[in-house]
Amino acid sequence: MAKNLLYLTLLLMFLTSCEKVYTPKIETIQGQLVVEARITNDPFQNFVRLTKTTGFYSSQLGEPVSGATIKLISTNGAILRGKETITGYFTFSTIPEIGQNYKLQILYNNDTYESEIVTMPPNPSITDLYSKTVTNKTYSLDGFGALVANVETGRELYVDLPVTADLAHYRLNTRAVMEWVFYPPGGMGPPPPTHYGWQTYYAGGNFNLAGSKQFTQTGTIEKQPLMFLTYDTKALIADSIFSGWIVIMDQFGISQGSYDFHQKLNSQFNADGNLFDPIETQIYGNITCKTDPAKIAYGYFDLNSYRQYRYYLYFNGPDSKGVQREILRYPDIPFDGRRDTIPPSWWE
């Protein structure tokens, strides 16, 4: 009996030791420069942000870099200087010229970092924007762990984009602002004010890229998906009345290099833990240290052309012909909110 208890104790000790969490020793490379740089033809879209890398297991955000000098240098000799508005964040008051070649130069801690030379693309445009009824099916687990299918019908938004020798790649960001109206029930006194509300939804997923892999014989990137808008607005606004969507599409004309870089980032975002999945430190940008090649600068100098499109859309089901019209005014729209009695000035 005593021998059996000894064997049982040894077995429990062995199983317990197998559950010990192993934390591998990973060389931490701290203090490397991280560069986020986007320069466009819109001064409100232009910035350079500098931070430092942290340890692999650190949960802290990168430390902002202070005291650097930022220059946007044209091959014709013109220099645009960045202004540090907050620590590590630089803006430019002048925009680059279309068709001109530029490089980003960073002077920091007696080192000089430079990007490759990039050409400023022409202003982007679209050929058409339209929608089509689609049914999306997703799966989730219920409270008992069973797989449940979720079916949702709505409109998928698409855009056609022109392809030219000077501009053949794009990055697209889409935001949809749902407008709703609520009429509170009246009482004995004067009628209560009408509520005008709105809430924002973004296209989920990775960077929305359109480029050479989508080329057609017509010289157009056709049916590039933008965003799915559900018909079931009641699930989002309860007893309020759906009043339409304001769709805001930010379009960036980008280079082949920017397209490839963001494709690699998409691959990293989609990584599911396999041995050969890409990791962030394998995704190199276009910035190097000229004074010390051993020093690494992470990030990418993105020189983009920019344009924004806005549309008002209204449809309430697959049989609805709907309304679509372009909006030619561009006021700022808060993320969400509500106004009583009268709608905000940007209301459609």
Image (tube, rainbow, N blue to C red):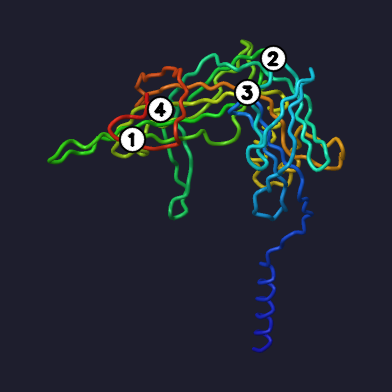
Query: CA–CA distance between discs 3 and 4?
Result: 24 Å
Q: Earlier in the sequence, mark 3 or mark 4?
A: 3
Q: Which residue is mark 4?
A: 245
Q: Nearer the viewer, mark 1 or mark 4?
A: 1
Q: Which residue is mark 2?
A: 166
Mark 2, secondary structure of its residue: loop
| Label 2 crowd (10 A; few <14 / some 14-19 / many >=20) | few
Judge left or right: residue 150 versus residue 22.
Answer: left
**347 is higher (above) or lower (below) than 265:** above
Asked if disc 3 and disc 1 are in contact, CB closer than 8 Å, the reply is no
Q: Earlier in the sequence, mark 2 or mark 1?
A: 2
Asked if disc 3 and disc 2 are in contact, CB closer than 8 Å, the reply is no
Which residue is painted at 60% across and 22% down in the image?
306
Query: CA–CA distance between discs 3 and 1?
Result: 36 Å
The amino acid type, in three-letter code, at marker 1 is Arg
Which residue is painted at 68% across and 64% down in the image?
21
Q: Which residue is mark 3?
A: 170
Q: Earlier in the sequence, mark 1 or mark 4?
A: 4
Query: CA–CA distance between discs 2 and 1?
Result: 45 Å
The amino acid type, in three-letter code, at marker 3 is Tyr
| Label 3 crowd (10 A; few <14 / some 14-19 / many >=20) | many
Q: Position of residue 206 (x, y in %)?
A: 59, 35
Q: Nearer the viewer, mark 2 or mark 1?
A: 1
Q: Which residue is mark 1?
A: 339
Q: Earlier in the sequence, mark 3 or mark 1?
A: 3
